[in-house]
Image (cartoon, grey):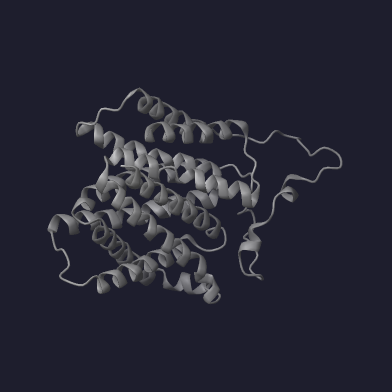
Amino acid sequence: MNWTLTLAGIAAVAWGSADFLAGTGTRRLPIVTVLIGSELTGLVLALAYLAGRGGPLPASPRLIVISALAGVLAVPGMGLAYRAMRDGSPAVVAPVAAGASLVPIAWGLLHGDRPGVVSMIGVVAALAGMTCSSWPTVPRPGRTSPPGRPSPPDQHPSPDRFFPPGQPSPPGRFTPAGRPGRAAFWCVGGAALCFGTFFVLLHEAAPSDPYIATAYVRVAGGVIGLVLLAVARRRVRAHVGGGSTWVLPIAVGVLETVADGAFAHAAAGVAVGAAAVVASLYPAVTVSLNAVLFRERMPAVHLCGVVAALVGVVCLAG
């Protein structure tokens, strides 16, 4: 039990790191470029695993179909999440996506799981956190920095240090204390639904063979990545400045693949709700990286939402 939940925690760390890199990268690269790079990386890793596995590959129709559905569904989920983090702060958007854990909890309830009082408190806290995190805020008119203190933009390190020089950030894209708009939260809500369904599908496929399920998931996602590359090749080519451009999407793909494998193994050993809520701690990683590297400040209502969402996930995991 402890080992499987540790694997779910590893998935949370990998997903949170991948979301931070992807959310930062989509401020400089088109979303489709990051998606294609990460999915093709997962495809290469999956094919390498399948080639070195040895012996006949499992060909259960149920395993193949469920894994393929999970892989296909993950692509729009990641695209929506990256779009939301591009347009808003990753520290605010990521906890809203933690609502994905509510989907497998509902699935578990329909299949006989009976959560305790602490788990119910976690559900309420998660819902309250998502509401507060998405609460619209408007900067106070006429508010200025105190004399002798630098203006807000000067208080935060620029993300330019994470990218090759000579590629300025698009105007208006990076605002460390940026307020996500309504479109960003529609996107992250859709991402939460996709990810929650992904958790359930991977749990249903994983018991037969967690690693082969992960490989099939990444192959399905890679096929979608190839389709996207064929459709958007001109746009991708226009934004590719060299080999260094692909470093970040490749890193995202590696982290996503590690997270998928760790979660698949964890979901095979415990109830899907328990595995999903521990894996849903990934927003804490995204928030921590954002706070440490960008020293981001958030409005009080958003900060309360972040804390409530994370407390809710911890309660659900307990």
Q: Residue at x 55, y 44 (%)?
A: 91
Name the side, left or right, on which 66 lies relative to 161.
left
Q: Residue 300: x percent and y percent? A: 62, 31
For the N terminus, which image quadrant? Answer: top left
In this view, the residue farthest toward the bottom is 242
In this view, the residue farthest toward the right is 148
Q: Residue at x 13, y 59 (%)?
A: 60
Q: Please tell me in which quadrant of the rendered image residue 218 appears.
A: bottom left
Q: Residue 246: x percent and y percent? A: 49, 70
Q: Residue 42: x percent and y percent? A: 36, 65
The answer to whether residue 35 shows anywhere in this view is: no
For the C terminus, which image quadrant? Answer: top left
Q: Nearer the viewer, residue 255 or 66?
A: 255
Q: Please tell me in which quadrant of the rendered image residue 44 appears.
A: bottom left
Q: Residue at x 41, y 47 (%)?
A: 9
The answer to whether residue 317 shows anywhere in this view is: yes
Name the side, left or right, on which 253 lies relative to 242.
left
Q: Please tell me in which quadrant of the rendered image residue 312 appears.
A: top left
